[in-house]
Amino acid sequence: MKVDLKPRVGRTVAALFAGLAAAVAFSAPAQADYPDKPVRVIVGFSAGGTTDVIARIMSKELTQALGQSFVVENRPGAGSNIATDLVARATPDGYTLLFVAVTSAINQTLYKNVNFDLVKDFTPVALGAKVPNLLVVNPQVPVKSVKELVDYAKKNPGKLAFASSGSGTSIHMAGELFKQRAGIDVLHVPYKGSAPAVTDLIGGQVQFMFDNMPSAWPHAQAGKLNALAVTTSQRSPSAPNLPTMQESGFDKFDVSSWFGLIAPAGTPPEVVNKLNAAMVKALDNPEVLKAYADLGAVAQKTTPAEFGAFIKSEVETWAPVVKASGARVD
């Protein structure tokens, strides 16, 4: 008996294509309708810090723009590594995101054992803000410019000390970069936070430091500290008369605390682009810009690709600085 297999094969192929079509039809709306449930925004620092505050400002905007709750979840510890590792291992569906800061770029070299690669294990979404650092000195130090500070340090090797908010922090690394680029012999004195460091700087126990603008600038305006330069590539709108480090003779000295949104590697491009568009639009909101300005932050609009290139450059920039400083966390 001869059996004609053509109809059966035809039905099998038809069923296969029908299944594929159904799968596509099922998956496409899932991405098109993103988000259809609350989204976790992980922050690697405690509530109330700059990273947390900026994350909450942006999460509120994303909630309003995309119609689902973007809920900030603080997971502090290990210099934000606990939060970063958590998101690196999360399902890449856009429902677990990380509000990342410059600390994560520094940690790639600072920590001996890191379970994630900031470049390979994440999909960049958008850079949202930068907070400039200020180079500030105690008024008793007889200098009025960056050049005068460098000259004074060279005439007094080993006699000046610069403060930081802790070993391995972005503030510490800014000081180390300055020390290396200027070729000066100065002592690093780490503190447990920016506030006690600034207090001792005002008191004269240390002579200078690079500090985030929001905490340093009020003291400079009050005459308790002398501000010599801002560390970003452009002058700060909050202090337009203050020169940049580049204007002060330090080419390509562009250092800031920065904050942005990243997702696990493999997150669908449609989801990433939707998040990016919402963030970029939020940065046109006058209320957001004012909230940023109150923090000393400057809004930054990027594409995902631009933010990815920026993250890679930050990891590469800080690696030799960390190594030269001798700072290391096991």
Image (cartoon, helix red, strand yellow):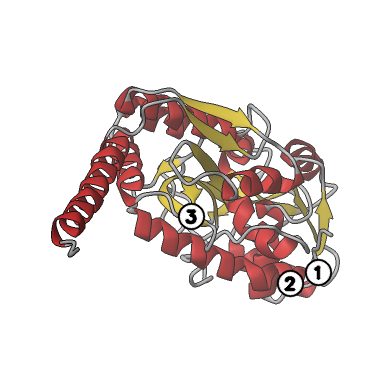
Where is the N terminus found, in terms of image quarters?
bottom left
Q: Give the vertical position of 185 relative to 330 (above or below).
A: below
Q: Is residue 312 above or below residue 55?
A: below
Q: Nearer the viewer, residue 187 or 130?
A: 130
Report which quarter residue 150 is drawn in: bottom right
Instruction: Find numbered disc 1 in the image and state the secondary structure of the residue it sits on.
Output: loop
- Give percent across and percent down for residue 151: 68, 72
| Cα distance between the residues tagged 3 and 1 | 31 Å
The residue to which callout 3 is attached is 265
Residue 5 image position (x, y, % from top left): 18, 61
Q: Amino acid at mark 2?
A: Lys
Earlier-in-chain disc, 3 versus 2: 3
Q: Amino acid at mark 3?
A: Ala
**Of discs 3 and 2, which sits in the foreground?**
3
Q: Is residue 228 above or below residue 192?
A: below
The residue carrying pointer 3 sits among few (fewer than 14), some (14 to 19) or many (20 or more) residues within 10 Å by Cα, namely many
The amino acid sitting under disc 1 is: Gly
* Mark identifier at residue 323: 2
Drawn side of residue 112 relative to residue 61, left or right? right
Residue labelled with disc 1: 326
Q: Are marks 1 and 2 in contact (CB under 8 Å)?
A: yes
Residue at (78% x, 43% y) in the render? 197
Residue 61 in the image: state x and y as whole percent: 37, 27
In front here: 101 or 182?
Answer: 101
Residue 52 sits in quarter: top right
Do tag 3 and tag 2 residues touch (Cβ < 8 Å)? no
Q: Secondary structure at mark 2?
A: helix
